Image (cartoon, helix red, strand yellow):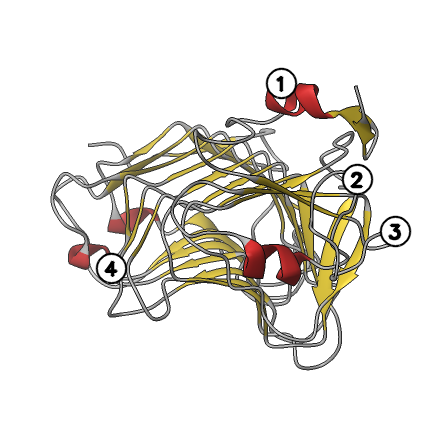
Amino acid sequence: MALYGGIDNQSINAITSRPLTAPGARAWFVDGTNGNDGNVGDQSAPFASIGAAISSAAATRGDVVIIAPGTYTITSALIPLANMSFIAGRQTNPRRPSVTITGNIADLVQIDVAGTHWEGIEFKASGSTADNLVDIADTADVAGVGFVNCVFHGADQTSVVGIQADDATYILTDMLIRGCLFRDLTGTHVDIGAKGMAYGYIGHNQFAIDVAAGTGIALADTSAFATGKGYVIENNVFTGVDSTADEVGITIAGTENTTAAGIIRNNYFAYCAASAITVDKLSLSEVQNYYGDAATGGTLVDPGT
């Protein structure tokens, strides 16, 4: 069996959270060192750029882009087609992915289609024009975008947001963020707008809030969320905060939603000078969250019923 990026082609299914290809779909290969955009994009003749794979793919059929280890510097945002997957060809330590996408541009990735999936990839800011590492639902409704074992690296550039989904017009549903690391971001790590994130799941991630007045997850006015279309934020850790500044792990803006906008449970926070969660906004939805406390070793962040 031929090897690609340190694993055999038949083993890719075993290390990813979704199949290599759907029936009728195609796998495209990218190798920034040995590839060429004039190639056909198969395993023996890979493309050099991720953009070439996107240009060759077909929307909705479930094409997969398998990316060889390396740093991919882009000059314009990657705009995936619907139902495309992007997977690092070698996945070892999720804290330090083998594939890095970077560039001195406003947005590294713009997602306005359904069903895209990203696994084992680092999104890294570069230069002064960086704005959002990933921008979602900016011009259209988006459903089913997922990030698994990815790193969102702000590189301490000015006002860099990890995942930007703060649009007042378009709706984000069924989002998955699992096993990811958010680090060195000078803006909000995950920014969710007034349309909410219906049926979304954010779990088992690390938010390393290491700048003054930093925010891990920002939720807009919860009263705008539709009844029964709740999200789940659970089992995350919020670390790296500066005890002299006004960091907040999870912020909730606006007025309280009493119709079960979502549940926030079992999250842990290092010392927060401001607060771990703005608990007065979802008083029936925050369960068994804790933040570090010098006196007792841990304080429950739970407003009760």
Residue 208 in percent (x, y) is at 65, 48
Quadrant of the drawing holding the N terminus: top right
Residue 226 in percent (x, y) is at 14, 49
- Identify the residue position indicated by label 4 in the image: 195
Crowding near pointer 1: few (<14 within 10 Å), some, many (20+)?
few
Q: Is residue 257 above or below residue 291?
A: below
| Left or right of 96 on screen, residue 25 | left
Measured Cα–Cα span from mark 2 to mark 3: 10 Å
Residue 240 in percent (x, y) is at 69, 48
Q: Which callout, 4 or 3, points at the residue further toward the start of the chain?
A: 3
Give the amino acid at mark 1.
Ala
Tags 3 and 1 in contact by the CB under 8 Å rule?
Answer: no
Residue at the spot x=27%, y=49% of the render?
Answer: 280
Dot in front, 4 or 3: 3
Give the amino acid at mark 2.
Ser
| Left or right of 57 on screen, residue 119 | right
Measured Cα–Cα span from mark 2 to mark 1: 21 Å
Measured Cα–Cα span from mark 3 to mark 1: 25 Å
Image disc number at residue 44: 2
> From this viewpoint, is residue 244 visible?
no
Measured Cα–Cα span from mark 4 to mark 3: 43 Å
Q: Which callout, 3 or 1, points at the residue further toward the start of the chain?
A: 1
Q: Which type of secondary structure does the marked residue at label 4 adopt?
A: loop
Image disc number at residue 34: 3
Q: For residue 285, what is the image quadrant? A: top left
